[in-house]
Amino acid sequence: MLAVMPHHTPLIGTIVAGLVIAFVMGALAHRLKMPPIAGYLLAGVIVGPFTPGFVADGGLAAELAEIGIILLMFGVGLHFSLKDLLAVRRIALPGAIVQIVVATALGTALGLAMGWDPMASGIFGLALSVASTVVLLRALQSRNLVQTEQGRIAVGWLIVEDLAMVVALVLLPALVAMQRDGGQDLGGILRAAGLVVVKVGGFLALMLLVGRKLIPALLHWAAHSGSRELFRLAVLATALGVAFGAALVFGMSFALGAFFAGMILGETQLSRRAAEETLPLRDAFAVLFFVSVGMLFDPAVLIEQPLPLLATLAIIVLGKSLAAFAIVRGFGHSGQTAVTISASLAQIGEFSFILASLGVGLEVLPATARDLILAGAILSILINPLLFSLLVKRARPAADGRGGTAAAAVYRTVLIGYGRVGCLIAHRIRDQASHLAVIEDQGDTAAAATRDGFSVVLGNATDPEVLARAQLADATTLVIAIPGGIEAGAIAARARATNPSLRIIARAHSDEDVANLKRRGADVVVMAEEEAANRMAAIALRSTQG
């Protein structure tokens, strides 16, 4: 008989415990109408070292979370272009710098008030100034804002913050050495700063000159090989390989390397397919990021340091957010744009942990400061979704081809999904349908549908608010063109409850999907393989009879 757990498996234990408990707590949070992120963070606390029971490997959890950050930034890069990045440089660059200075000054003042020396106080303030990649992007995605002006400014702002943190992580050891040597190592600091500039410039040049040809060529070859598995592997190899190479050779962060790799690939026709292939892993590892953050949290700090913790949280949520609001308004942008950017930045995350760990390792940052940073991160990540729901509006529906908005007309047919199948359906029924609305959750695909002259509602069709914006209650026909049987079934059930007389047509790829869709309310389910077989058999019979 095989022995149970014949050897120590910390990696498997960490992944299993993290995902299983995150699912349980995330489901509970969803049931209580709280953000699932709250459940993921609590799952981390449960498997962390400060609570009884099973303790996951914190180092492994952090490395697994880094993979999620890489894939997330790669996905964002796929929907970005160099033109988009340069378009927001005039506000993102000075805005991020000023906001970092303001937040650092506030944190430094708090550190000095607590009796820390200037170096420790400055590191503490800098750690409070940079937002989390994962939290910011999740918040933007939840409100369909990534492809909007606010989203582009926020992502550009984030890139500048990340670059600033890369510089800080390189210069900090030199600054500490200079302090200990009595200020005699200024040349070392200048050399370190110059090396950072050279490395970043070298990476960007390599990506623009070589990456623009090599990465698309690799992905095109994999796509034309006919193997979906090989294409998926090529996408993951590109994202992870470029991120790791950027960190190893050029000293950049994993996130920045992955972002630029995605941005280069985003200029090709394969960008949408690449995004789809990385989505499941991206979501799974992003959950592990929140679990890893929760593992770092020691609840005792809530009792032992309540006032310093409140001050730290105020700097994160209020101080730097108000600074960002003033900066964005000062550049002439609308109040809603300023609120969106402010809410996006009202949290801290992975770079803050790295900087705090480095400060403690160099013996210049007290452990109390690290605990406050971690506690501030946890609480700000919990608060951030609530801020978004209270202050930030969802992206408005895209304008239709006749100059109105998607919600302005009374629809007769609603089409869900404008991918390869949905696009063909839309063009073929355009002239026969008195009104046709398209629901699409991918910003670039929704923009393509808008350019083709269709009324478009941007959002996920499982959301009742999105269906309401499409005025599904007044429709006569719903066409579900997305391939996912489970998601399509959920949409069919919600649509049937909204409009009992609606005729629902859906697509499927298996007998199980057909049964599920019909059970959930679909009137007609078209299985692609069956239709293709019928068509090919009919042609073959005509050929033999002819």
Image (cartoon, helix red, strand yellow):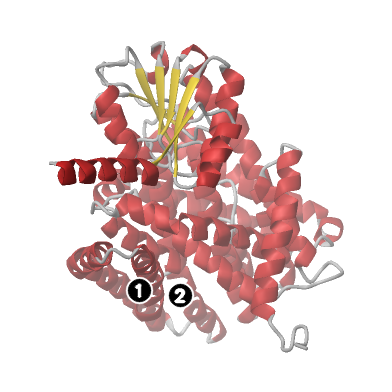
Nearer the observer: mark 1 or 2; the answer is 1
Residue holding disc 2: 171
Taking the spot 66% from the left edge, 75% from the top edge, the residue there is 12
Badge 1 vs badge 2, beta-carbon distance below 8 Å: yes
Coordinates of residue 43 in the picture (x, y in percent)? 74, 59
Assess disc 1: are there few (<14), some (14-19) or many (≥20) residues with their C-alpha within 10 Å of its C-alpha. many
Image quadrant assignment for residue 543:
top left
Coordinates of residue 484 in the picture (x, y in percent)? 48, 44
Taking the spot 41% from the left edge, 70% from the top edge, the residue there is 240
Coordinates of residue 345 in the picture (x, y in percent)? 53, 47
Q: Is residue 63 left or right of residue 415?
A: right
Q: Is residue 101 left or right of residue 452?
A: right
Measure the C-alpha gap from mark 1 to mark 2: 9 Å
Element class at badge 2: helix
Taking the spot 82% from the left edge, 53% from the top edge, the residue there is 306
Assess disc 2: are there few (<14), some (14-19) or many (≥20) residues with their C-alpha within 10 Å of its C-alpha. some
Is residue 84 placed above or below 440 in the rendered structure?
below
Element class at badge 1: helix
Q: Which of the marked residues, 1 or 2, is nearer the chain's N terminus?
A: 2
Residue projecting furthest to the left: 546
Going by the numbered disc 2, the residue's amino acid type is Leu
Coordinates of residue 208 in the picture (x, y in percent)? 21, 64
| Image disc number at residue 196 | 1
Whether residue 369 is visible, yes or no, is: no
Quarter of the picture containing the C terminus is: top left
Q: Is residue 56 left or right of residue 140?
A: right
